[in-house]
Amino acid sequence: MSGGVDLARRLSRAATLRRAALWTAGAVPWLLLRAGPGLLAWSAFCAWDWLHLQRRVAHGWAHWIDGAVPEMEDSAALLAQEPATAVARLQRQRLLARIDAALTPRRLRAVNAAHVPRGWAWLAANLVLAGLAWGAALLPHATGKQAAAPGTPGRQTSVSVAHAGLVVKLAPPSYTGVAPSSSAPNDVQVPEQTAVEWCLDDPQAPSEAIELSDGQTLHAAKECARWTATESIFWRWRGTRYTLKVIPDQPPDIAVTQPNAMTKDLPRDAKNAAIAVTVTDDYRVQQATLHLTLARGSGENIRFSDRELPLPASSDPRRRSWSRDWLLTDLGMEPGDELYFFVRAADNAAKPHTVQSPTYTLRLPAPPSAQDEETTALPTLVKPESLRSQRQVIIDTEQLVADMRSKKMRADEVRARSEGIASDQAALRRRYGQFLGEESTLFGKDDDHDEHAGGKVDVLHEFGHAHDQAENATLFDDATKKLLRRALSAMWDAEKALRAITPKTALPPEYKALDAIKELQQSERIYLHKTAFAPPAIKEDKRMSGDMAGSASYKRAQAEAGEIVPANLRDLVQALGGDGPLPALWTRTAHDWVRARILEDEQRLAAQRAIQDVADGQLAARARLAAWLRGGVADAPVLLQARPVVETPFSKALQGGGR
């Protein structure tokens, strides 16, 4: 047997004996408590500690001996393996010869004492855990004895303490699909219009008061107290508040994913048009329909045809998704037609919520024609034959720019052509400008104002003051006027560039003017939903009778403005600023004001808690209630009149005026 292996075993045995006292002492508390889990946990720790100790001895015994036994000459490592050189073998034989004399049992215990601690910290932690386990075992017995002290059996007392005494029953509306439930008092969330009942477990028990945050007081006795959940409230029973939050029934939500814009222009060669719709509801989508309106024709010869398609139901009653890639022939669309569609949906509530999406438009452009620049949104004009279109102005300008690049042109020729194009642009600008009330000189009148000696002068227009604007005299809507102004502004910029003999700079505003004119063309057809007005039936027996009973006067009474803050509320806020008594019926005033002015659930509940605290006599809650009442004033009155102030010699001296 190797001397190194034997020496390591002796050190390991000595270290185990040193730690055995710790392992034994730690098991004693768990044996006394008869706690199996604790004893098992301590045994697992002892096994881990023994393995850790053996690993430490196996890796460090040579260093321990070299530091504690000088006779080993720092060569204890030679005992762990067979040396490779002759000198090392000779040294190993010398160590084996003196090992028994040098390593006595006393020295082995000293080496272990220096490197293996007793582990009293582990024992202290173990004792603390055992003490906690002992206290936890005694606590239920002490609680049971204390509860049983008044003279009733312990089992009956524990049952009476756990007994709630009040049961809250919730019956949501049948259309929600939520099952009824009953539970002890706690904070709950219920659907809107849920029937809430507070019932006593023992019908023979005395009546219990249920205080609601809106000022009502219900009594639960032999019959349950009932209330319909229309808004979020909190209720108080035996001094404890519980919140009952109402989840409103939301209307269906309609999402149109295709097309992705309110107005979509289809390509001229388009064959298909995609329409995708999704309708969702919190409980059930009862009905969803797609309404299609096809517009065909132009001017006064526009014809509309309507269709209505139901959206199919899906496996999920709360969601209906429908998409289809329509053939334009199935939709009945031809070049130049427009298709308007919207979605109308309703849920399954007792009073169904019906919603309608915005109207989307699909346009299929008509084939190009020579009169594309002419917009039918504007009145038809008898224009001279020499009037150029905006597209022709652009063509002429591009040709001039190309000629200036390709060949050398004389300055007078460039100026003549540029000013000629500018004149065409000016004529076109004046033609469109007259629809905004601007003066036009297209029909026999020139731009230059010829002043003759005996000519007439329009004094009214030259020196008078106009009380209206010429632009407002036109019959166009604001959107059409905006497009016209944009086109005219671009034409002005193009004309200035052409007058300055810079035709290349005139091209961008010319294109901008052309885009505005094209947009005017596309806005010639306007679709509006039909609105029917059904006047009330005329009572024939009252006609020509002169009986004015029940009829409203056509005279408008010139009364004073109503009060923004009622007088009783002002008195209440003023009384809340002190410690004195509050006005009569102040709780009704406060509840009515909070319910009418504070719409957010959490804020309204906080204000109602403040009302209840003030009613309970808490002086600190008065400031909170006054703040909530003042916060409900949306439009605070502005007082401009001066207030009378009595000035005394003392007040003047205090303000520094009496010096």
Image: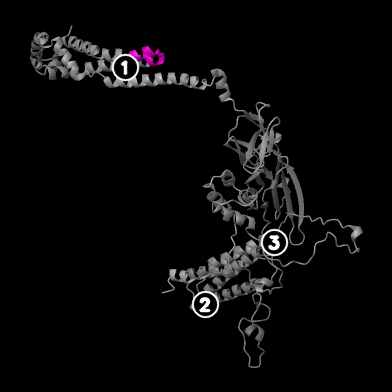
Question: Badge 3, how many Cα within 10 Å: few under 14, some, many 20+?
Answer: some
Q: What is the three-letter code of the residue carrying label 1?
A: Trp
Q: Which residue is mark 1?
A: 48
Q: Mark 3 and mark 1: span between their CA atoms?
A: 90 Å
Q: Which residue is mark 3?
A: 524
Q: What is the three-letter code of the residue carrying label 3?
A: Glu
Marks 2 and 3 close (CB-CB < 8 Å): no
* Relative height, residue 323 to residue 392 (above, below): above
Task: Give whichever of 221, 46 is nearer the camera.
Answer: 221
Q: Quadrant of the N terminus?
A: top left
Residue 23 in the image: x percent, y percent?
A: 30, 14
Q: Mark 2 and mark 3: span between their CA atoms?
A: 38 Å
Task: Give whichever of 475, 294 is nearer the camera.
Answer: 475
Q: Mark 2 and mark 1: span between their CA atoms?
A: 104 Å
Question: Badge 1, how many Cα within 10 Å: few under 14, some, many 20+?
Answer: few
Residue 73 in the image: x percent, y percent?
A: 9, 17
Is 296 a magenta residue? no
For marks 2 and 3 on the same chain, the one whose residue lies earlier in the sequence: 2
* Relative height, residue 75 to residue 432 (above, below): above
Q: Quadrant of the C terminus?
A: bottom left
For marks 3 and 1 on the same chain, the one whose residue lies earlier in the sequence: 1
